[in-house]
């Protein structure tokens, strides 16, 4: 085994940090849904790729700036998320059954993506991809830096809202003890719809980040499910900063593994970390 140069190692660490930021952004909505609403929403991944394809289409066909597409995608996905939660609540779907129902929604969205955009690979060519910040021999791509900034900003803002605002306190109270929260006048249904819409909007934001930095294909919906679940479990359910920290840890670990050993070993990292936490600290999640 040949050790990489310092330049390659630093570049790999930064690449892992950027990938981990996207893991954290994708995991944030899933963590809040699972931890605070008791819903395992696999449709979160499908919404992210639907947002990525919408960004691709609006940018290539109508010359809309990828970041401007957020003005359409965020409110649209908020409404979709609230509607899905209303459907699950209407039929009193349990946590396990919510995973099955939302997996069905994921399959339907994948079929929709293949019908509209086919199974061919697509890549968004934006002006953001042409910009790279160079620090010595290290390159920092603009799309990845934007993803890192948005992921950190959203995670910190979400934590502040949950900890410092009345809405956040109401959401946490409903998650801890719904009956006591209702007795103190908390509208649980309204809070749940608000949080579900917010989680879906997060998927839309993640979709824009995916479109900026990655090649798109409908089958890739399932590619990151395992690593995002690892981020959520390692970071803790319902903890806004947890998935981001865990995602960066996993991303950097995978990148170093690819640089030092072999790319084929990288997928083992996230699950090895998850197994270690589950075995050594079973009460962590």
Image (spheres, rainbow, N blue to C red):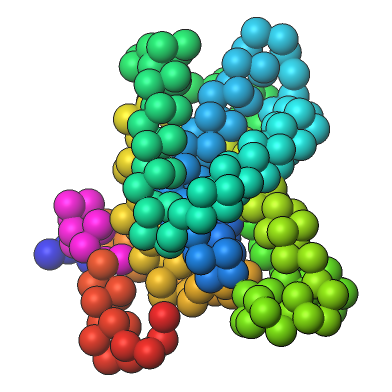
- Front-most of residues 192 and 77: 192
List x then y, in percent, for residue 121: 38, 19
Seen from the viewer's position, the closer of residues 15 and 271 is: 271
Q: Is residue 234 left or right of residue 28?
A: left
Point out residue 233 in the picture as x, y percentages from the top left corner: 41, 72
> Can I make out residue 253 in this image?
yes
Residue at the spot 63% in from the left edge and 46% down from the top edge: 86
Q: Which residues are magenta?
A: 260-270
The quarter of the rendered structure image containing the N terminus is: bottom left
Give x and y (percent) for residue 209.
59, 40
Q: Is residue 145 above or below residue 37?
A: above
Image quarter of residue 65: top right
Inspect this view and state whether residue 139 appears: no
Q: Residue placed at 62% from the left, 82% from the top?
A: 176
> In the picture shown, does residue 76 fall above or below 245?
above
Q: In the visual, does 249 lie left or right of 148? A: left
Picture layout, residue 281 above or below residue 217:
below
Q: Main secondary structure of the magenta part?
A: helix
Does residue 105 appear to the left or right of 3 in the view shown?
right
Residue 162 percent coordinates (x, y): 75, 73
Q: Is residue 193 above or below residue 260?
A: above
User: Is residue 264 covered in magenta?
Assistant: yes
- Which quadrant holds the C terminus? bottom left
Residue pushed farthest top? 61
Q: Residue at x 43, y 60 (%)?
A: 94
The structure residue drawn at horizontal position 45% and vertical position 67%, both measured from the top left corner, is 232
């Amino acid at each position: 085994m040949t050790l990489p140069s310092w330049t390659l190692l630093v570049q790999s660490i930064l690449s892992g940090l950027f990938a981990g930021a996207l893991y954290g952004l994708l995991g944030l909505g899933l963590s809040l849904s699972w931890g605070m609403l008791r819903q395992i929403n696999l449709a979160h991944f499908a919404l992210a790729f639907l947002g990525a394809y919408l960004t691709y289409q609006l940018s290539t066909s109508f010359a809309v700036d990828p970041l401007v597409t957020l003005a359409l995608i965020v409110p649209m996905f908020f409404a979709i998320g609230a509607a899905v939660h209303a459907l699950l609540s209407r039929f009193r779907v349990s946590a396990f059954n919510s995973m099955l129902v939302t997996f069905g929604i994921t399959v339907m969205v994948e079929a929709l993506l293949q019908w509209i955009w086919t199974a061919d690979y697509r890549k968004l060519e934006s002006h953001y991809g042409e910009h790279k910040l160079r620090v010595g021999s290290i390159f920092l791509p603009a799309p990845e830096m934007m993803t890192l900034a948005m992921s950190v900003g959203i995670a910190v803002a979400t934590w502040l809202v949950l900890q410092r605002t009345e809405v956040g306190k109401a959401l946490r109270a409903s998650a801890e003890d719904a009956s006591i929260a209702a007795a103190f006048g908390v509208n649980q249904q309204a809070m749940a719809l608000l949080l579900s819409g917010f989680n879906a909007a997060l998927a839309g934001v993640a979709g824009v980040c995916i479109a900026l930095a990655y090649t798109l294909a409908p089958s890739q919906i399932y590619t990151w499910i395992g690593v995002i679940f690892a981020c959520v479990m390692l970071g803790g359910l319902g903890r806004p900063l947890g998935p981001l920290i865990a995602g960066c840890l996993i991303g950097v670990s995978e990148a170093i593994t690819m640089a030092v050993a072999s790319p084929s070993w990288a997928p083992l990292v996230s699950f090895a970390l998850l197994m270690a936490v589950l075995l050594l600290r079973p009460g962590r999640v």
